[in-house]
Amino acid sequence: MSFDVREATRELKAWRTTVNRGEAPLFLHDQVEPRKDRATQVLVTKGDMIFGTDHLRTALYHAKRAFAEGSNSANTLALETLLYASGERQLSSALKKMTVDDDTSEVVIAQLSEGAFTPKESWAPLPEKPDSPSKERLAKFGISEKELATIGNKNPVELVLEKVAAVDVLKK
């Protein structure tokens, strides 16, 4: 496997959409599963916990590398990607943080592997990086005020990407 990030994640496509509160848990079954073939790996997660396609690309890259090296914690690419995307070392913590629930009003859908997947026309493509995520949203993800103070004028999404990369260290 190539470990060039762009090459290793070339099949990544991601979209964002809103859902009515209470309907997100059924979204995967009703809206995503019928749109994909059996072999396609798709991840559905809370929209407020994803900070652009770069965030997902970094998580997918690390997940694929973990599988190639035999250091994966999960048994599917989607779950391993979710683990990295969460910035958590424990899968149970990652699931709690990232899995859609009754309070979810925005979801991100990511195609992680090659295969047939047809998004709804109403789903918006996920941008590479959000313009300026709020401090509240960053805090919910786990970025502290102290960490924010270290980056100066840089995009705070860089701290999210650092947390993704740090999962490798935390897993060992």
Image (tube, rainbow, N blue to C red):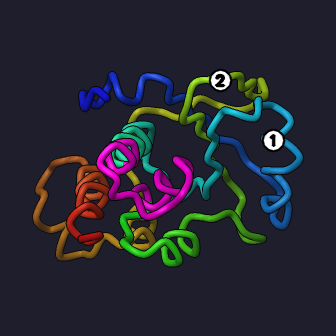
Q: Report whether 95 appears left or right of 40.
A: left
Taking the magenta stretch, the answer to whether it contains residue 75 is yes
Give the residues drawn in magenta, as a range: 63-85
Nearer the observer, 131 or 158? 158
Q: Which mark is residue 71?
A: none
10 Å crowding of disc 1: few (<14), some (14-19), many (20+): some
10 Å crowding of disc 2: few (<14), some (14-19), many (20+): some
In this figure, which residue is indicated by the disc labeled 1? 33
Q: Secondary structure at mark 1?
A: helix
In this figure, which residue is indicated by the disc labeled 2? 115
Q: In the image, what residue type sits under mark 1?
A: Glu
Residue 28: image x %, image y %? 78, 50
Q: Report whether 31 appears left or right of 78.
A: right
Q: Secondary structure at mark 2?
A: loop
Q: Kindly identify the residue that appears in the image at 53 percent across and 71 percent down.
A: 97
**Cα–Cα gap, marks 2 and 1:** 13 Å
The answer to which image quadrant residue 61 occupies is top left
Q: Kindly identify the residue that appears in the image at 28 percent across and 52 percent down.
A: 161
Above or below for 62 versus 137: above
Q: Kindly identify the residue that appears in the image at 31 percent across and 57 percent down.
A: 164
